[in-house]
């Protein structure tokens, strides 16, 4: 309600009682509200009933009522006159005509805003696939349900990595340090001549973001995002006994998804004509 306001014109489309035109609130909560009866007006009345010759004309309270509703007294005695305008009534959201408002306007108005995180570009880049991007967003927030995290909550007893069967399954381990995932990631990044570095997944993503070659950076980030998704899916498959992929087979699946994403990208199709040096990178 704090974001809604009215630019009152002829008053024909605004309900006196059930639209929040007065101090961002409605005057009545239901058709049986005492304020309606005591004002002498009908529950269907619109604001044009209170406008006469371009000026406000408030009703007189019912003199037969000995105990007037406090809201009615406040409304009649301390009325702050909204400005009147010619033309039709307008409903505004943050002073913008509601007819021009998009969903993102409303979301930007009501959401909590924080400083942009350093790994932002590593998740929401040109080649992102929403399913993969959402998963990596969770990973960058440190919210993957690893065994180490579940153990901390007292939900599991073991912390042994499902992929290498030797390390403690933390987010950093399963994405960077595990012998299984490390081999897959090194195989993917070798085509870009990128060395895996960083103490955490977020640091590794920041390293890819900061590469001087912007195009190469976006391609590497896309590969890393697909890798993050596939590694976690393989981990879950093993956790639930649904089959096991060897690292080479997983690597082939990541390459297939990467090539499919490039083929569907208009941005990449324009870039590759001027960057023949990147053709070998796309083949992985």
Image: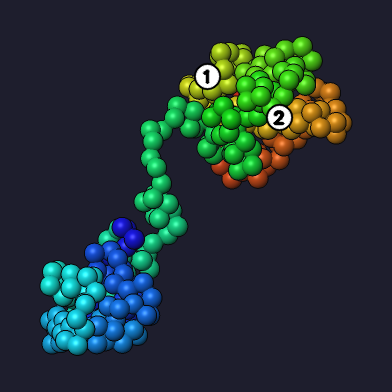
Q: Earlier in the sequence, mark 1 or mark 2?
A: 1
Residue at numbered disc 1: 203
Q: Nearer the viewer, mark 1 or mark 2?
A: 2
Residue 232, numbered circle: 2
Residue at 61 percent of width and 13 percent of height: 195
> Against 276, is 101 above or below?
below
Q: Nearer the viewer, residue 42 or 125?
A: 42
Asked where in the image residue 36 lies, by quadrant, the reply is: bottom left
Asked where in the image residue 5 lies, by quadrant, the reply is: bottom left
Left or right, 249 with reference to 155? right
**Mark 1 element type:** helix
Q: Nearer the viewer, residue 103 or 44?
A: 44
Residue 161, image x, y percentages: 74, 18
Q: Nearer the viewer, residue 51 or 192?
A: 51
Q: Quadrant of the N terminus?
A: bottom left
> Against 99, is 164 above or below?
above
Residue at 50 percent of width and 25 percent of height: 209
Left or right, 210 with reference to 146? left
**Mark 2 element type:** helix
State the count of labels: 2
């Amino acid at each position: 309600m704090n974001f809604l306001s009215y630019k009152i014109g002829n008053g024909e489309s605004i309900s006196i009682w059930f639209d929040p035109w007065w101090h961002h609130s409605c005057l009545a909560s239901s058709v049986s509200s005492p304020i309606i009866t005591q004002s002498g007006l009908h529950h269907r009345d619109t604001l044009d009933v209170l406008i006469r010759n371009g000026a406000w004309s408030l009703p007189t309270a019912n003199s037969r009522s000995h105990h007037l509703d406090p809201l009615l007294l406040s409304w009649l005695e301390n009325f702050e006159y909204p400005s009147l305008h010619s033309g039709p009534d307008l409903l505004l959201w943050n002073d913008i005509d509601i007819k021009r408002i998009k969903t993102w306007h409303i979301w930007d108005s009501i959401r909590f805003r924080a400083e942009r995180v350093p790994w932002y570009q590593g998740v929401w880049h040109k080649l992102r696939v929403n399913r993969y991007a959402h998963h990596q967003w969770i990973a960058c927030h440190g919210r993957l349900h690893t065994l180490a995290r579940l153990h901390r909550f007292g939900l599991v007893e073991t912390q042994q990595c499902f992929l290498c069967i030797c390390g403690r399954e933390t987010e950093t381990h399963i994405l960077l340090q595990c012998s299984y995932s490390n081999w897959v990631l090194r195989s993917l990044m070798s085509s870009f001549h990128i060395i895996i570095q960083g103490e955490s997944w977020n640091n590794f993503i920041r390293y890819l973001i900061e590469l001087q070659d912007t195009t190469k950076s976006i391609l590497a980030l896309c590969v890393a995002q697909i890798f993050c998704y596939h590694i976690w899916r393989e981990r879950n498959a093993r956790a639930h006994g649904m089959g096991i992929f060897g690292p080479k087979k997983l690597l082939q699946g990541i390459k297939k998804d990467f090539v499919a994403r490039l083929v569907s990208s208009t941005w990449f199709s324009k870039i590759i004509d001027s960057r023949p040096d990147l053709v070998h990178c796309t083949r992985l």
